[in-house]
Amino acid sequence: MKKILSLAVALLVTTSLYAVPPQEKGDMPEPPHQHFQKMGPDFEKIAKELNITDEQKAQMNEMMKVDMERKQELRKQVREKMDAISDELMKENIDMNAVNAIAAEVQQLSADISRINKQIKSKKCFIF
């Protein structure tokens, strides 16, 4: 019975993680000078038409870099929380309140990652 309960909780937690949209390949950290290359094929042309200065490009790169670093930290926290859930499920006496509390934290962290992704996309749209 305990094994079935453990499996059910593990399945529930794993399923809830996949409810958050998968991260895009472009979400991975990259050198700041490459952000503009990823923003679209015509970014340099548009930047030139809008008279965006090198200083403004540098500021935008810095904003993107901060967002990427924050997402990396959140992903690290998600991994740590998932390890904590695994550890809790392996115990002789499983504390379901602890498992549920950690799962809620994982969901919040995943929501934070999604929020940052939306902010990044809106910043890109704002530029244009």
Image (cartoon, helix red, strand yellow):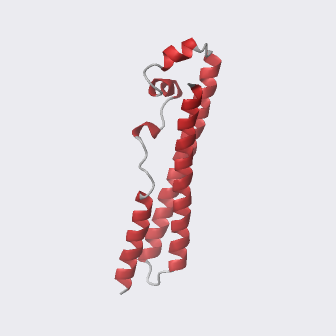
Residue 14 picture location, percent across and down: 40, 64
Between residues 36 and 62, which one lies in front from this camera angle? 36
Question: How many marks overall?
Answer: 0
Instruction: Give the residue drawn at x 45%, y 19%.
Output: 42
Residue 101 picture location, percent across and down: 56, 71
Q: Let me know if residue 28 appears in the view.
A: no
Residue 119 picture location, percent across and down: 58, 40
**Residue 9 appears left or right of 69:** left
Between residues 125 and 105, which one lies in front from this camera angle? 125
Residue 22 picture location, percent across and down: 41, 49
Q: Is residue 25 above or below residue 74?
A: above
Q: Quadrant of residue 57?
A: top right
Q: Is residue 99 above or below residue 92?
A: above
Quadrant of the drawing holding the N terminus: bottom left
Q: Is residue 11 above or below residue 126?
A: below
Q: Quadrant of residue 122?
A: top right
Instruction: Give the residue drawn at x 43%, y 51%.
Output: 21
Instruction: Give the residue drawn at x 50%, y 51%.
Output: 75
Q: Let me know if residue 67 appears in the view.
A: yes
Q: Quadrant of residue 48?
A: top right
